Image (tube, helix red, strand yellow):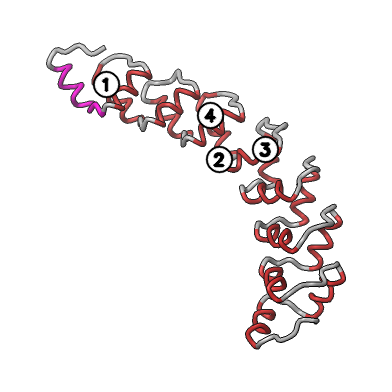
Amino acid sequence: LGITDLSTDDLVELSIHNISAKFVAEMRALGFEDLDLDDLIELGNHNISPKYVAEMRALGFSKLRIDDLVELGSHGVSPKYVAEMRRLGLTDLDLDDLVEFANHGISPAYIKEMRSLGFTDLDVDQLIEFGSHGVSARYVAEMRQTGLGQLSADQLVEMSDHGVSPRFVREIHEAGLDDLDVDDLVELNNHGITPRFVREVRQMVGGQLSIDQIIELRNHNVDPRLLQELRAGGVKIE
């Protein structure tokens, strides 16, 4: 093998990771002639086989180093994954793009789902942003069902990034605030305003309150029960 001074523990480690003499010979035939024990264990640990290397090279990745292979393997980027992405028209993905995609759960199925929802022209950065902010196909579909309509990619990212869920939107609408845009919803959520708070202050005041008024009440920790007591005492609240 060209690797000398192997201890019993080293041999056990190689065996555990299915590193055989044939594996080493095939990797050397692919140009990896200076593999040490750590390299072999890393390759085996991440399921990087000579077949994997050959298939990635056939896809145009001809200059992958050991570190590159390990990074691809650790993120689950397979030749099949690359080929499926290319069939979807993503033909210029580099090593970093592939790792970012896999790291954020951007699968071929995910892209197909997003395209079926009308997002047919998302670029690499937008797809990564969707994935990194947890914008799933389900999230998009459920947001549309709340009545917000055709939200842009930026709007979806903003809402998801600020924790605005479809349930939050539905319950805010049910609380009586049904004419809100994305900025309003983000603002309400950022200030910790719950549907329950909205419902209670509206009931206690007995009239309409603007978004700014609701936010001001929340920011100053005004208890809805205080509003009820003031109103019962004849204080008019506007």
Main SS, magenta residues? helix
| Earlier residue among tags 2 and 4 | 2
* Real-space CA distance between mark 2 and mark 3, rounded to the nearest whole angstrom: 12 Å
Dot 2 amino acid type: His
* Real-space CA distance between mark 3 and mark 4, rounded to the nearest whole angstrom: 26 Å
* Rendered location of residue 63, percent (x, y): 82, 57
| Earlier residue among tags 1 and 2 | 2
The residue carrying pointer 2 sits among few (fewer than 14), some (14 to 19) or many (20 or more) residues within 10 Å by Cα, namely some
From this view, report whether residue 109 is shown above or below residue 164. below
Judging depth in this view, the residue of 77 and 29 nearest the camera is 29
- The residue under the point 64% across, 41% down is 128
Query: Could you tell me which secondary element the residue under label 4 belongs to?
Result: helix
The residue carrying pointer 4 sits among few (fewer than 14), some (14 to 19) or many (20 or more) residues within 10 Å by Cα, namely few
Q: Name the residue carrying label 3.
A: 125
* Rendered location of residue 192, percent (x, y): 36, 33
Q: Name the residue carrying label 4.
A: 145
The quarter of the image holding the N terminus is bottom right
Query: Could you tell me which secondary element the residue under label 1 belongs to?
Result: helix
| Earlier residue among tags 3 and 4 | 3
From this view, report whether residue 128 is shown above or below residue 102. above
Marks 1 and 2 close (CB-CB < 8 Å):
no
Q: Name the residue carrying label 1.
A: 203
Dot 1 amino acid type: Gln
Left or right: 209 with respect to 222? right
Viewer-side label of 2, 4: 2
